Image: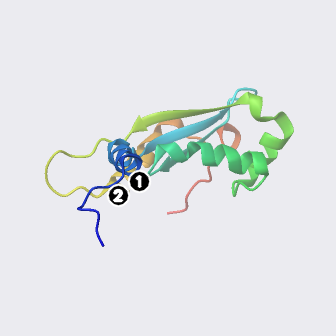
Amino acid sequence: MTNGGNEDGSKKELKQLYKETKVEAGVYQIKNSINNKVFIGSTRNLKTLKGKQFELEMGTSTNKMLQDEWNQYGKEVFSFDVLEVLKPKETGYFDAKRELKKLEEAWLEKIQPYEERGYNRVKSS
């Protein structure tokens, strides 16, 4: 038995809301205001930044240095900022993962968040 293709109102609204909620990829930083060290990262969904904060609060961040200083200084001294949103190309093929990696590398190059300046590890080439 079908209901003639009519979805109930709330389900339809939720679907529409989901479609309208644009997932934005981009590059972000987590900054320690005490020593000005930063961590630069990228994500395919900038809404997941809350998840990064939650990991630090729970003590489960995979970045040991960042986690140690979070534990030492407390969450109040850290800020989470979006540095740049990835702009998809209007036409043609767009490899979001590759473009996001390039964008992150450009920010790493610009800010150099390594050793005493930050929490990123220098990638060996």
Q: How many marks?
A: 2
Position in image of residue 9 (x %, y %): 36, 46
Q: Is residue 94 visible?
A: yes
Q: Is residue 21 left or right of residue 2?
A: right
Three-letter code, disc 1: Lys
Height in image: 6 above or below 53? below
Q: Which mark is residue 101?
A: 1
Q: Is residue 78 left or right of residue 113?
A: right
Position in image of residue 39 (x %, y %): 61, 42
User: Image point 18% across, 58% down: which residue?
Assistant: 93
Query: From this viewpoint, which residue is outermost toward the right?
Result: 72
Give SS at disc 1. Answer: helix
User: Image point 30% across, 73% down: which residue?
Assistant: 1
Cα–Cα gap, marks 2 and 1: 5 Å
Query: From this viewpoint, which residue is outermost toward the left?
Result: 91
User: Image point 54% across, 47% down: which residue?
Assistant: 48
Query: From this viewpoint, which residue is outermost toward the front?
Result: 1
Position in image of residue 58 (x %, y %): 77, 51
The residue nearer to you, when weighing 20 against 119, is: 20
Looking at the picture, the colour scheme in use is rainbow
The residue nearer to you, when weighing 108 against 1, is: 1
In which quarter of the view is residue 21 placed?
A: top left
Q: Is residue 119 visible?
A: no
In which quarter of the view is residue 117 placed?
A: top right
Asked if disc 2 and disc 1 are in contact, CB closer than 8 Å, the reply is yes
Give SS at disc 2. Answer: helix
Height in image: 9 above or below 1? above
User: Can you identify the residue that label 2 sits on?
Assistant: 98
User: Are there few (<14), some (14-19), or many (20+) residues within 10 Å of tag 2?
Assistant: few
Position in image of residue 50 (x %, y %): 61, 43
Three-letter code, disc 2: Arg
